[in-house]
Image: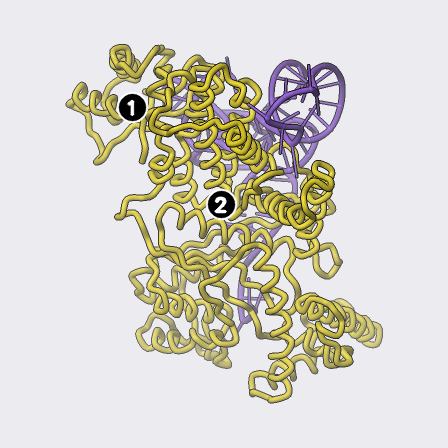
Chain colours: A yellow, B purple
Amino acid sequence: MNSFKCITQLADFLQQEFPQASFPENWTISAEKCPPNMDGDLTVNCFRFAKILRSSPDKIADKVLEFFNQNSDVDKAEKIKAFVNISLSPSAIYRDSVADIDSLLQSSQLEDAGKKRVLIEYSAPNTNKPQHLGHVRNNTLGMSLASLLSRVGHDVIQINLVNDRGIHICKSMLAYERFGEGITPELSGIKGDHLVGDFYVKYNSALKQQLDDLRSAKPELAEENDEKLFLETEIGQATQKMLQDWENGDEKVIALWKEMNSWVFAGFDQTYKRMGIKFDHTYLESETYLLGKDIVAEGLARGVFTKRPDGAVTIDLGKMGEKVVLRSDGTSVYITQDIGTTLKKYSDYKPEEQIWVVGDEQILHFKMLFEIMKKLGYPWANDLHHLAYGMVNLPSGKMKSREGTVVDADELFDEMVNLSEEACRERYGDSVSAEEIANRAETIGMGALKFMLLKFNPKTTMMFDPQASVKFEGDTGPYVQYACARINSIERKAVEKGLKFDAGTINWKLLDNNEEKTLAITAFFYPKVLQDAAEKMDCSALVDYLLELAKAFNRFYRECPVLAAENEDLAGARMALCHAVRNILTDGLNTLTIEVPEAM
RNA sequence: GCCCCGGUAGCUCAGAGGAUAGAGCACUUGACUUCUAAUCAAGCUGUCACAGGUUCGAAUCCUGUCCGGGGUACCA
């Protein structure tokens, strides 16, 4: 990774000065940015070295100060407690950061030994209803993590596993059979997943009606819950029958299933396309749901699992308790399928690591799954990871499909894009073509939404406030895009004015304003931010960083005129700085799967 | 009951051993004849849930308590 020369030299110096120390292999110092209220560019925290150097923080700080005082890159060094704050000479700042922007961007690549083949599974929708805001968070987290991991050099495989079978799928099928009257997406003009979802809603109200009727007819059942009474209803029995017919390969049921699923897939394709998602492969649960059974049989023979007197096959997972992996009637449970698909994904792609992007209510499920894979003896079972993310709540509380409080994905996209289109039109009116306005609005609206979702740490249960979320001011995606647009604009105008800069002959020393230096130093940290975010599998760190860099740019923009600089050398140096910053911002947004409009 | 996650400014959230705890929104004020005001500057805002403990140093680690969310299926 990139480093400031004087910091690398400091590490060498300390290794000589403290021979009694116990340095870890490849020991490096990562300097931190000096806090804004302190005087300096970088800070070295000597408290951190006390253990490694086997000396007191204060003594170390004295040595560090002594070193910096005679280092030519350092203009000023100051010791406060065991912190040593340094101000770098402008030439050192730019030489070690933005002067070679291509190699700075490149230095975020991991060393070959750290690169892995990673399989990431996300989205995993059901084919009985359209996707909502919860899926959008999942999709955004998944695609951005995939992009981030691949950005630092991993070989990433993106997988979707669609839940296209089961009793809940039969529900919308049954409702269609009863109330559909042969409607299709083409005839109705309704997007396929929404059309199927409408029947799922119709099913639930029909079921509710029957449950109500049942409870008034048989008061003794009034206290039982819906699940218990499901098979007591006519519609419940019919649904159960349909599932059995499906499993027996009944032609009519299969035909309906295929047709309705094809509608849903066509709808999902549109949603994914709009988000920019491309899976390397989509597994269908209808093709994988029986996979785990033979592994269980084989594990049973090897004594990994045990058969209970009632016939169920189980495994003792210690603190997590006993887990059933095969029902007493011999059928699979959820975890059986996951055992099967985990192995399937492994044998299909041979990943060194598998990641699942799945909600945090399934934390225990995955802990159990991983433990079972270990007990089955797969050597790669230590490299399975559940990226658990929190739910999305609304100001009114939880999203509930039954109560109709879900925020639909496609509608949300439209709303975000329409609002940004309005804003674009306000700015540009007729001076820009309608097509160009629409393109910009799409980029800005979708970018704002993704950025907003990624700003939260994945594990936090987040609140989505539609009123606040559609704003494009403050800590938002458009704020970062806007900084890029400003730089693009400067570059366009520079061409008009015939101003050019030559990367090889920039006189960086001219840039000695605080805004300029802060901008370059902030830029310096980009590779580390990328690697740390990838390591933590958390894009929110990158989001925060991009805001910080954009903010630093906007301050620079205010204070330091580029095109109207006092002379051409200064203009050239500032243009080079802008160019580097724009490349980082664009690279960062692209890493988050957010595009950047040419102008806005 | 047990397990997991959380409680930080009016609101939404960062910070996860280190300096005087931050950002955006909201509110108040100022800046568009200027490279794009989707911007910038200034102001206001805190019992870091509570109580102990460890430490040179704790919002951060440990213990306990309170509050909120999730899990605890032969559901997925």
Residue A532: image quadrant is top left
Cα distance in 3D space between marks 1 and 2: 30 Å
Rendered location of residue A440, percent (x, y): 63, 45
Is residue A240 placed above or below A197 in the rendered structure?
below
Rendered location of residue A264, percent (x, y): 63, 69
Q: Residue at (57%, 42%) from the top-left corner?
A: A597
For the residue carrying disc 2, how many other residues have a C-alpha within 10 Å: few (<14), some (14-19), or many (20+)?
some
Rendered location of residue A560, percent (x, y): 52, 19
Horizontally, residue A289 falls left or right of residue A210, namely left
Q: Which mark is residue A551?
A: none
Marked residue nearer the N-terminal end (1 or 2): 1
Are tags 1 and 2 found on a single chain? yes
Q: Residue at (74%, 69%) from the top-left corner?
A: A189
Res A225 seen here: no
Nearer mark to the viewer, of 1 and 2: 2
Q: Amino acid at mark 1?
A: Ile
For the residue carrying disc 1, how many other residues have a C-alpha within 10 Å: few (<14), some (14-19), or many (20+)?
some
The residue labelled by disc 2 is: A590
Give whichever of A92, B56 is nearer the camera: A92
Please tell me whether mark 1 sits on a helix, a strand or a loop.
helix
The residue labelled by disc 1 is: A7
Res A350 seen here: yes
Provide the chain ID for the residue under circle 1.
A
